[in-house]
Image (tube, rainbow, N blue to C red):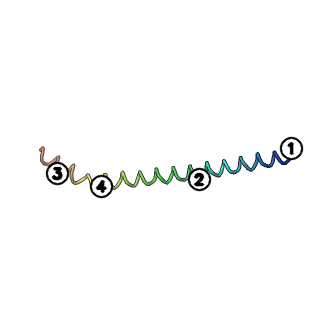
């Protein structure tokens, strides 16, 4: 009986660790996507900022 409970506890720990790893993987992917989006936005805004600078010179 005690051994069975121990096994179930270990199984829950493994499942919890796996779900944590999956969640972390999703967060890292989202951060990577956000970084790419920020870089693309920066590229898109560069000409706008340059023309604003030229207009105020």
Looking at the rendered structure, the secondary structure element under dot 3 is helix
Q: Which mark is nearer the camera, 1 or 2?
A: 1
Say whether residue 1 is left or right of residue 21.
Answer: right
Determine which of the numbered discs, if any, sits on residue 51 in the image.
3
How far apart in space, not on screen, are marks 1 and 3 (Cα)?
A: 74 Å
Q: Looking at the image, do the residues carrying marks 2 and 3 touch, with CB atoms under 8 Å apart? A: no
- Residue beneath the point at 55% across and 53% down: 25
Q: Which mark is nearer the camera, 1 or 3?
A: 1
Q: Residues within 10 Å of mark 1 (few under 14, many from 20)?
A: few
The disc, 1 or 2, on the residue closer to the chain's N-terminal end is 1
Q: Which mark is nearer the camera, 1 or 4?
A: 1
- Looking at the picture, how far across and down is residue 50, in whole percent? 20, 50
Q: Which mark is nearer the camera, 2 or 3?
A: 2
Q: Quadrant of the C terminus?
A: top left
Question: Viewer-proximal residue, 3 or 43?
Answer: 3
How far apart in space, not on screen, are marks 1 and 4 (Cα)?
A: 61 Å
- Residue beneath the point at 59% across and 53% down: 22
Looking at the rendered structure, the secondary structure element under dot 1 is helix
- Residue beneath the point at 36% across and 51% down: 38
How far apart in space, not on screen, are marks 1 and 2 (Cα)?
A: 30 Å
Q: Which residue in the protein does label 1 denote?
A: 2
How far apart in space, not on screen, are marks 2 and 3 (Cα)?
A: 44 Å
The disc, 4 or 3, on the residue closer to the chain's N-terminal end is 4
| Furthest-right residue in this view | 1
- Looking at the picture, how far across and down is residue 14, in whole percent? 71, 50
Q: Which residue in the protein does label 4 denote?
A: 43
Looking at the rendered structure, the secondary structure element under dot 4 is helix
Determine which of the numbered discs, if any, sits on residue 22 in the image.
2
- Looking at the picture, how far across and down is residue 34, in whole percent? 41, 51
- Looking at the picture, how far across and down is residue 33, in whole percent? 43, 54
Q: Looking at the image, do the residues carrying marks 1 and 2 touch, with CB atoms under 8 Å apart? A: no
Q: Residues within 10 Å of mark 4 (few under 14, many from 20)?
A: few
């Amino acid at each position: 009986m005690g051994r069975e409970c121990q096994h179930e506890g270990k199984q829950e720990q493994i499942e919890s660790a796996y779900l944590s790893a999956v969640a972390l993987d999703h967060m890292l992917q989202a951060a990577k996507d956000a970084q790419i989006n920020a870089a693309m936005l920066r590229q898109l805004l560069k000409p706008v900022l340059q023309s604003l600078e030229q207009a105020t010179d």
